[in-house]
Image (spheres, rainbow, N blue to C red):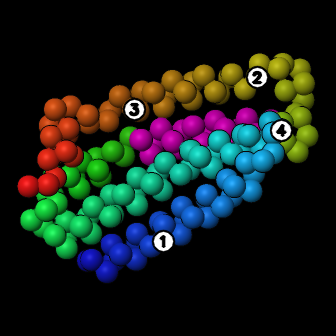
């Protein structure tokens, strides 16, 4: 199992490095499609960081069980609503990008506020998912009480 965790962590780290490289390529462009693509990459980094940190803590819990408790790793795995919220926002940004790139769609020309049809519900759905993040007192203690 630790070898599988290590391989999984390495693959997530490579994916994160590629995402950062893509973001750096697009960062200098100031046009709207580039900014939307940069937002898409930034939203995709959220689950990559989540799994990389969770796997790092799982490896630490395996290597040093006296230092890192299982409750800390369980808390990190329980943050899956953040990943779903990121996926919802990624979908909204993708649809928005497809409305304006490579050419502006007829819908966008007819009604400039058309991205609001999916951006507003998407933001609302992402916020609803984030209310499920276990940040109560039990989750707080589990995360911050991993040493000792």
* Secondary structure category for the residue under label 3: helix
- Mark 1 = which residue? 11
Q: Which residue is drawn at 24% across and 67% down?
A: 60
- 23 horizontally vs 11: left or right: right
Which of discs 2 and 1 lies nearer the camera? The answer is 1
Q: Are marks 2 and 3 in contact (CB under 8 Å)?
A: no
* Secondary structure category for the residue under label 4: loop
Mark sitting earlier along the chain (2/3): 2
Task: Residue 54 in the image: state x and y as whole percent.
Answer: 33, 58
Please, is residue 111 above or below residue 8 in the view? Answer: above
In the depicted view, which residue is nearer to us: 63 or 80?
A: 63
* Secondary structure category for the residue under label 1: helix
- Mark 2 = which residue? 114
- Mark 3 = which residue? 130
Q: Give the range drawn in magenta.
A: 82-99
Q: Do the residues labelled 1 and 3 touch (CB within 8 Å)?
A: no
Which of discs 4 and 1 lies nearer the camera? The answer is 4
- Mark 4 = which residue? 31
Task: Residue 122 in the image: state x and y as whole percent.
Answer: 57, 29
Task: Residue 142 in the image: state x and y as whole percent.
Answer: 16, 45
Mark sitting earlier along the chain (4/1): 1
Q: Are marks 3 and 4 in contact (CB under 8 Å)?
A: no
Residue 89 is inside the magenta segment: yes
Main SS of the magenta segment?
helix
Q: Residue at x 33, y 45 (%)?
A: 79
Q: How far apart are marks 3 and 4 (CA)?
A: 30 Å
- 80 horizontally vs 138: left or right: right
């Amino acid at each position: 199992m630790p070898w599988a965790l290590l391989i999984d962590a390495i693959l997530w780290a490579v994916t994160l490095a590629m995402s950062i490289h893509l973001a750096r390529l697009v960062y200098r462009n100031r046009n709207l499609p580039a900014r939307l693509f940069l937002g898409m990459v930034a939203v995709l980094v959220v689950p990559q960081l989540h799994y990389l940190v969770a796997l790092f803590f799982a490896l630490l819990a395996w290597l040093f069980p006296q230092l890192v408790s299982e409750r800390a790793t369980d808390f990190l795995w329980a943050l899956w609503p953040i990943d779903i919220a990121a996926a919802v926002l990624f979908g909204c940004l993708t649809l928005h990008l497809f409305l304006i790139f490579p050419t502006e769609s007829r819908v966008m020309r007819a009604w400039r506020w058309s991205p609001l049809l999916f951006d507003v519900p998407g933001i609302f759905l992402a916020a609803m998912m984030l209310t499920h993040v276990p940040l109560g007192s039990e989750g707080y203690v589990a995360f911050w009480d991993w040493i000792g």
